[in-house]
């Protein structure tokens, strides 16, 4: 199954992707996590990405598309993937379509997580992620780590993402509305979009998402 996850910053894309990818036996591919891994390894790509991420702006399409393509070509993604944070504008969506077309493949569904803005702000304000792997995500009230400041999954240090400051979050939300939301209409015209409310407990949202995907795609895997 080839799925794109879309939703505003803090909607719970990363949180849901971890469970959905496991349930569907496909890799979770997050361009944000890939950029953060590059930043912690201090690569050239990481340095470039950080200069945009810290301002809440999008990293240029050319490098983002090349990085996503490279990841999608890894053997574990042969039978499908769950994309989180990519594509993020219409140009990236067109590039993805082109990429899949040359391989004779296409997307199965675009899962749109709907969350009111005031909830998004609360989720981002309390988020803590692991220094070793930013896909290990916690929340000080909604999903506290067993030991404060320590990742339950790998023992890494938990910290607040540099782009989670109030000012940067405002820019990220604006970028989402102006640049990313148009991809929902782009995919609606292809009949791929399923929208689910992403409020409620994490596991309830996962159940809702699995049910919506089943209805959209059937049981194919
Ligand atoms: P990215 O890392 O993708 O950030 P984002 O889209 O802003 O989304 P977030 O990761 O902030 O939120 P999320 O939806 O994953 O929520 P989470 O599960 O953590 O991108 C960062 C930056 O990288 C971009 O700004 C850009 O600069 C760059 N970039 C990335 N991709 C790019 C691309 N394709 N092109 C160009 N640039 C790109 O959940 C949030 C919090 O809520 C957590 O604390 C969690 O525990 C909690 N939570 C989750 N679900 C629930 C629930 N049901 N109830 C209560 N709390 C919950
Ligand atoms: Mg995320």
Image (spheres, rainbow, N blue to C red):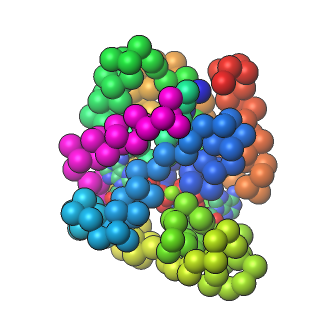
Given residues 65 and 87, the one toward you in this image is: 65
Residue 19, visible in the rendered structure:
yes
* In this rendering, position of residue 137 left or right of residue 50: right
In the rendered image of this protein, does residue 8 appear above or below residue 137?
above
Per the picture, the main secondary structure of the magenta-coloured stretch is helix
Given residues 204 and 95, the one toward you in this image is: 95
Which residue is pictured at 66% across the width and 24% down the height?
221
Which residue is pictured at 21% across the width and 63% down the height?
44
Corner quadrant of residue 66: top left
- Looking at this view, name the residue that lies furthest to the top: 104
Q: Quadrant of the N terminus?
A: top right
Given residues 100 and 175, the one toward you in this image is: 100
* In this rendering, position of residue 137 left or right of residue 85: right
Whether 59 is among the magenta residues is yes
Q: Which residues are magenta?
A: 55-78
Corner quadrant of residue 147: bottom right
In the rendered image of this protein, does residue 40 appear above or below residue 60?
below
Give x and y (percent) for residue 95: 29, 30
Residue 174, visible in the rendered structure:
no
Number of numbered labels in the structure image: 0
Whether 216 is among the magenta residues is no
In the rendered image of this protein, does residue 144 appear above or below residue 91?
below
Give x and y (percent) for residue 215: 72, 23
Which residue is pictured at 55% across the width and 23% down the height?
108
Give x and y (percent) for residue 114: 59, 46
Give x and y (percent) for residue 201: 76, 57
């Amino acid at each position: 199954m080839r799925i794109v996850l879309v939703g505003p910053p803090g909607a719970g894309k990363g949180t849901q992707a971890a469970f959905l990818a496991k349930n569907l036996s496909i890799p979770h591919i997050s361009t944000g996590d890939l950029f953060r891994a590059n930043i912690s390894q201090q690569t050239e790509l990481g340095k470039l990405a950080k200069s945009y991420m810290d301002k809440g702006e999008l990293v240029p399409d050319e490098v983002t598309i090349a990085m996503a393509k490279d990841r999608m070509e890894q053997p574990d993604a042969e039978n499908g993937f769950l994309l989180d944070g990519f594509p993020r504008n219409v140009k990236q969506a067109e590039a993805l379509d082109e990429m899949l077309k040359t391989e004779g493949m296409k997307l199965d569904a675009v899962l749109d997580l709907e969350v009111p803005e005031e909830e998004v702000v609360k989720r981002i304000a309390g988020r803590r992620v692991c220094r070793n792997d930013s896909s290990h995500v916690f929340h000080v009230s909604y999903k506290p780590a067993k030991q404060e400041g320590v990742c339950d999954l790998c023992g890494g240090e938990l910290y607040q993402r540099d782009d989670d400051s109030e000012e940067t979050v405002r820019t990220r939300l604006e970028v989402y509305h102006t640049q990313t939301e148009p991809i929902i209409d782009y995919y609606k015209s292809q009949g791929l979009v399923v929208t689910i409310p992403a409020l409620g407990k994490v596991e309830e949202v996962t159940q809702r998402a699995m049910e919506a995907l089943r209805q959209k795609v059937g049981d194919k895997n």
